[in-house]
Image (cartoon, coloured by chain):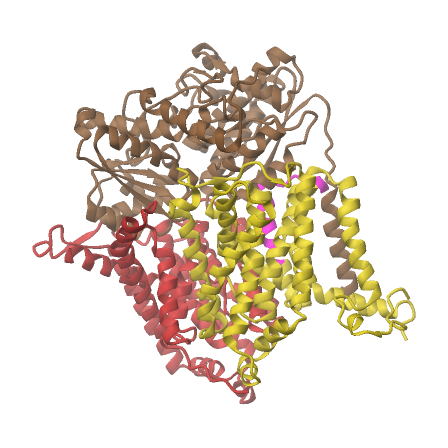
Chain colours: A yellow, B red, C brown
């Protein structure tokens, strides 16, 4: 009843090419953004900000990055954690060495550096495919992790190899409260997510998708694999790098290379698969799922008043999490985004399904 | 200088055999079902925990037999609960499902068997043997435990080769590996074959788990040796059993030599805070091989059609 | 389950997280504890967590709480991962009537992360025997308490011991000392001190990192075999320790020349290596293994009532005793705070004052059942460490045996380093150094 396209005529090229061509979708996105910016700060406590909203948003951004590469361009990568580390350390070093630089530039710099490294490590993808490529990307993961642990300049010669960011401010406004951090992260992520949404519909995005569906066929119709694959690596690493910088600055505050280890890569891959390959929305849903489910599972026995030992809870958390992933893949291999799409289909007919 | 290099080379080759043992489990499953089984590491952990805990109550040989039973049940559970329900899905979905299985097994193994550190005693001397002491100062060091591992690995590979070449089931396995649909159409039951493959790789996991467990003590970190098997896999080729062995040897020797020879140079040139390059070097080495042969050394040639 | 139902369940599931309602009585002291009873470091994390838990239970059972204030204790499993640790911290810091009394991270990585958060939330961090070495400077690290010893203390004691074996500090000249360390902030902490000591005493150093979790050490030990250092210091945790000892056996490096930090000198570290570990040494965080006066009470009030978290035989293990010590120091800090602020649940800020003014005399320790476990400890703003002494223990194949006299870390070496590093941290973070008075 409410979600109906009938009567929405596209009379201009502009309206035909809009990011959200359906009016209800547009309003939904605007409402969601308004809710996040205006309503959430009214009730959110610190825990909700720092442990739920900020991690979910930042990891969503990383998941979008990986989704561009894996979902849209079909290149399976397990090096996400390494690229996040590049972003985090690049941003840290710029902020440290040139303190007067604007915060936004710091994050963009993190993204750019990660992009350069990403292009470099993307070169083998021109020759290697599938699981071979996936394992080969682990080379970047382990190399980068090692580099940040060993090359002293990156950590400003910190004896412990751990770096910590100082006070953060934007245009003279200190970003110190969880609320401000959240708003900053939200706005940055929203802008980048909309950009990504737009990008994947563009010529570049279609090029990636052609490459994903069948690379040889794409090559024959005139898409250069060099351009397509490396641009996917570049854009993907940029997003991942910005996410890494945000993760370091707003989530951790102080970190060591272990914060970006191979488990982080797997975590983000989980988000992409559970959320749904080639879906920007799916990246958000997947991130929310992967961040929240373990927290939820961990606290559930406490809420229910079941006195389980800490060890049992942790083990159960592992087991249920693993089982849920398998269950999900069996029920809906195309992820949460697909569930969302089905819901929308249903809504279109509701309440008169004929 | 020759002495240490030779010693490192031998040590590396022997370590490589240990990697190959884990990689073998991967290959068996990938070959027969096209599943990139990331749960192999968790299976090694689970198998080692089973053997260790069972051997506290029973003599070792009985414990091993019981553990084999456990692994077969596990294989059946995975086949019945997971794989059968994911037939015809994309490779990446299957891969993710094995990651889910890995999580489950890590939790389940620790719940069932405990998360402390346990022992497996194979009765192999742990003291080093020194060879050629007259030729090189200090001799060449050999770890008897690793030699034993290499022997076990050799036996295992021979048994597997015979199993694949001679037996009826083995032939069926090869047929499935060649072409699922053709195999099914001549009447080979796919589900049964998958069960056999998973059970076999479970048994390989027991062998790997016992050797690693005797080396390191049985605890959670054993599941992480899977990460060491990955470069071995892609270097050798995902579908080749000899590839896993040769890959293991190359990676094992390569990374140890790099650590000893290249590590100190890198530290001096770039003023690094320590070496520790072997972790990424294995992957970079595999990557270099792949640039020349994208399907790995012994992998099947990738033929693409439109 | 249909797909829509499934979605609805999902939404309900995720929605639940926002509502974690704490229910607490008013006269309770809430103490959180970050533990790891699962994962790669569980064999070492479990006994420590048991020790802490049992001590709190003992105080509740025997004394009816701290001056009548019951302890409410909650564990949160971090798996030794920093981000999980931070999540646990955020989840637990506000619980109970007065919030968390203090945090015990049991991970240098988590300690680093919480160091940034503690001053904002006003909750002290007790990192007993770990954490940042410079955090003993309480004028900069007002909320950190690396009680009983930092890694610089440990490294300095080890060097002193080695010098004593060699026959004097001057005999160290030309010696080669290798450090095999866990590749994390934890393992890197001693490097600064060893470098300084190497300059002072003229020995050569060799730093060999081992990647987490430390099961791959073959190349490391081949390097040791080829370079033949005179001594090897081990800065490992979890499986890395037992693997290091096993690899030392495999390359034939004498265990008598190996010295571990206090986190590399407990039962789970040597037991898997069996006889191979005989002769291996470790610096003690003052205490050793065994059952003390304290254990009589533990038996009477906790274990005889079947309330113990460990098995009774395990209560004499090093990490268990260390957990109990950590629990005791925390409780005594709260007691100290109560003397000033009254017998009610303390806030984190009040507990901080309590730790900073913690003064346990030999008599008091005896009273608490810790005679022979700890030496007197006195904390102050200038010294958040409280004590800087240690001994060496040796594994004889069955038990840990104390094998040296007491050493005290050399202030002439350590103090300037603390001052310098703390000042740099203060400058980086724009902190004005100073002591807090309340």
Res A311 seen here: no
First to last magenta residue range: A301-323
Q: Residue at x 34, y 36 (%)?
A: C191
Residue positioned most to the bottom: B186
Task: Name the one closer to the observer, A34 or C2.
Answer: A34
Q: Residue at x 36, y 69 (%)?
A: B288
Q: Is residue A274 left or right of residue C198?
A: right
Q: Position of residue A218 (x, y in %)?
A: 57, 81
Depth order, front residue of B141/C121? C121
Q: Quadrant of residue A268?
A: bottom right
Q: Is residue C145 visible?
A: yes
Q: Is residue A307 magenta?
A: yes
Nearest to the observer: residue C353 or residue A110: A110
The location of residue C430, given as percent across then percent down, is 53, 30
| Percent of width and height locating residue C294 | 47, 20
Q: Say which quadrant the C terminus of chain A sits in.
A: bottom right
Considering only vertical position in the picture, is C50 above or below A71? above
As displayed, is residue A144 above or below residue C53? below
Report which quarter residue A266 is drawn in: bottom right
Q: Position of residue B254 (x, y in %)?
A: 29, 62
């Amino acid at each position: 009843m409410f979600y109906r396209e009938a009567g929405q005529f596209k009379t201009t090229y502009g309206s035909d090419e809009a990011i959200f061509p359906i009016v209800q979708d547009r309003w939904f996105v605007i409402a969601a953004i308004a809710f996040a910016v205006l309503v959430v700060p009214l009730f959110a406590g610190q825990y909700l900000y720092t442990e739920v909203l900020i991690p979910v948003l930042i990891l969503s951004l990383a998941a979008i990055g990986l989704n561009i590469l894996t979902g849209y361009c079909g290149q399976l990568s397990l090096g996400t954690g390494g690229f996040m580390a590049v972003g985090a350390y690049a941003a840290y070093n710029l902020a440290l060495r040139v303190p007067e630089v604007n915060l936004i530039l710091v994050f963009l710099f993190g993204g750019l550096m990660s992009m350069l490294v990403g292009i470099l490590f993307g070169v083998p993808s021109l020759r290697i495919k599938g699981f071979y490529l996936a394992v080969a990307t682990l080379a970047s993961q382990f190399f980068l992790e090692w580099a940040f642990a060993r090359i002293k300049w990156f950590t400003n010669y910190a004896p412990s190899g751990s770096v910590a960011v100082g006070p953060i401010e934007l245009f003279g406004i200190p970003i110190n409260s969880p609320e401000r951090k959240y708003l900053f992260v939200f706005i940055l992520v929203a802008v980048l997510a909309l950009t990504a949404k737009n990008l994947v519909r563009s010529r570049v995005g279609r090029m990636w998708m052609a490459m994903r569906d069948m690379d040889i066929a794409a090559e024959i119709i005139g898409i250069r694999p060099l351009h397509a694959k490396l641009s996917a690596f570049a854009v993907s690493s940029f997003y991942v790098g910005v996410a890494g910088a945000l993760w370091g600055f707003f989530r951790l505050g102080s970190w060591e290379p272990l914060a970006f280890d191979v488990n982080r890569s797997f975590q983000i891959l989980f988000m992409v698969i559970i959320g749904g390959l080639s879906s920007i929305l799916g990246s958000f849903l997947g991130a929310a799922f992967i961040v929240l489910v373990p927290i939820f599972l961990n606290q559930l026995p406490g809420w229910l008043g079941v006195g389980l030992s800490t060890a049992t809870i942790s083990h159960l958390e592992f087991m249920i999490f693993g089982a849920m992933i398998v269950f999900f893949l069996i029920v809906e291999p195309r992820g949460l985004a697909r569930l969302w799409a089905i819901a929308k289909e249903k809504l279109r007919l509701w309440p008169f399904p004929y | 200088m020759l002495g240490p290099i030779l010693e490192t080379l031998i040590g590396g080759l022997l370590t490589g055999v240990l990697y190959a043992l884990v990689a073998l489990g991967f290959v068996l499953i990938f070959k027969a079902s096209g599943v990139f089984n990331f749960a192999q590491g968790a299976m090694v952990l689970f198998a080692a925990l089973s053997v260790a805990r069972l051997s506290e109550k029973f003599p070792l040989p009985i414990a091993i037999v019981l553990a084999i039973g456990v692994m077969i049940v596990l294989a059946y559970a995975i086949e019945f609960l997971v794989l059968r329900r994911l037939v015809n899905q994309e490779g990446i979905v299957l891969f993710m499902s094995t990651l889910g299985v890995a999580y489950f097994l890590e939790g389940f193994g620790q719940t069932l068997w405990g998360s402390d550190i346990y022992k497996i005693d194979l009765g192999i001397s742990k003291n080093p043997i020194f060879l050629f002491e007259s030729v090189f100062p200090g001799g060449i060091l050999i770890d008897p435990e690793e030699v034993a591992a290499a022997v076990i690995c050799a036996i295992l590979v021979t048994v597997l080769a015979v199993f694949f070449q001679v037996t009826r089931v083995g032939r069926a396995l090869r047929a499935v590996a060649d072409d699922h649909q053709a195999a099914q159409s001549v009447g080979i039951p796919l589900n049964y074959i998958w069960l056999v493959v998973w059970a076999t790789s479970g048994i390989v996991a027991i062998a790997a788990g016992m050797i690693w467990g005797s080396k390191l003590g049985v605890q959670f970190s054993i599941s992480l040796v899977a990460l060491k098997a990955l470069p071995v896999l892609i270097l050798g080729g995902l579908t080749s059993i000899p590839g896993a062995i040769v890959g293991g040897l190359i990676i094992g020797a390569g990374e140890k030599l790099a650590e000893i020879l290249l590590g100190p140079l890198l530290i001096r040139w770039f003023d690094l805070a320590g070496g520790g390059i072997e972790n990424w070097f294995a992957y970079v080495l595999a990557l270099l091989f792949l640039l020349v042969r994208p399907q790995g050394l012994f992998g099947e040639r990738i033929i693409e059609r439109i | 389950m249909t797909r829509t139902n499934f979605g609805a369940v999902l939404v309900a599931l995720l929605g639940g997280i926002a509502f974690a309602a704490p229910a607490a009585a008013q006269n309770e002291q809430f103490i959180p504890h970050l533990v790891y009873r699962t994962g790669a470091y569980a064999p070492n994390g479990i006994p420590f967590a048991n020790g802490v838990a049992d001590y709190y239970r003992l105080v509740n059972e025997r004394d009816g709480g701290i001056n009548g204030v019951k302890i409410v204790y909650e564990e949160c499993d971090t798996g030794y991962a920093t981000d999980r640790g931070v999540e646990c911290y955020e989840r637990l810091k506000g619980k109970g009537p007065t919030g968390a009394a203090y945090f015990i991270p049991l991970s240098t990585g988590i300690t680093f992360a919480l160091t940034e958060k503690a001053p904002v939330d006003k909750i002290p961090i007790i990192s007993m025997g770990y954490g940042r070495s410079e955090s003993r400077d309480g004028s900069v690290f007002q909320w950190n308490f690396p009680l009983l010893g930092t890694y610089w203390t440990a490294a300095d004691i080890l060097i002193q011991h080695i010098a004593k074996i060699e026959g004097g500090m001057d005999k160290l000249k030309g010696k080669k000392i290798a450090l095999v360390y866990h590749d994390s902030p934890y393992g890197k902490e001693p490097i600064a001190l060893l470098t300084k000591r190497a300059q002072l005493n003229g020995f050569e150093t060799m730093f060999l990192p081992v990647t987490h979790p430390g099961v791959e050490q073959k190349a490391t030990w081949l390097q040791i075999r080829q370079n033949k250092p005179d001594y090897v210091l081990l800065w490992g945790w979890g499986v890395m320790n037992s693997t290091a000892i096993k690899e030392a056996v495999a390359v034939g490096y004498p265990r008598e020349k190996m010295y571990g930090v206090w986190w590399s000198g407990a039962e789970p570290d040597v037991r898997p290596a069996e006889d191979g570990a005989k002769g291996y040494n470790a610096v003690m965080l003052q205490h050793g293994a065994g059952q003390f006066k304290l254990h009589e009470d533990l038996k009477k009030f906790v274990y005889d009532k079947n309330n113990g978290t460990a098995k009774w035989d395990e209560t004499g293990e090093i990490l268990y005793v260390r957990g109990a010590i950590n629990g005791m120091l925390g409780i005594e800090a709260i007691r100290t705070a109560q003397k000033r602020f009254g017998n009610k649940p303390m806030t984190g800020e009040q507990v901080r004052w309590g730790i900073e003014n913690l003064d346990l005399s030999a008599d008091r320790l005896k009273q608490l059942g810790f005679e022979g476990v700890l030496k007197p400890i006195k904390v102050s703003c200038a010294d958040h460490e409280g004590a800087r002494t240690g001994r060496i223990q040796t594994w004889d194949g069955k038990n840990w045996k104390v094998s040296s006299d007491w050493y005290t870390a050399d202030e002439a070496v350590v103090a300037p380093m603390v001052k310098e590093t703390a000042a740099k941290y203060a400058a980086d973070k724009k902190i004005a150094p100073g002591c807090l008075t309340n």
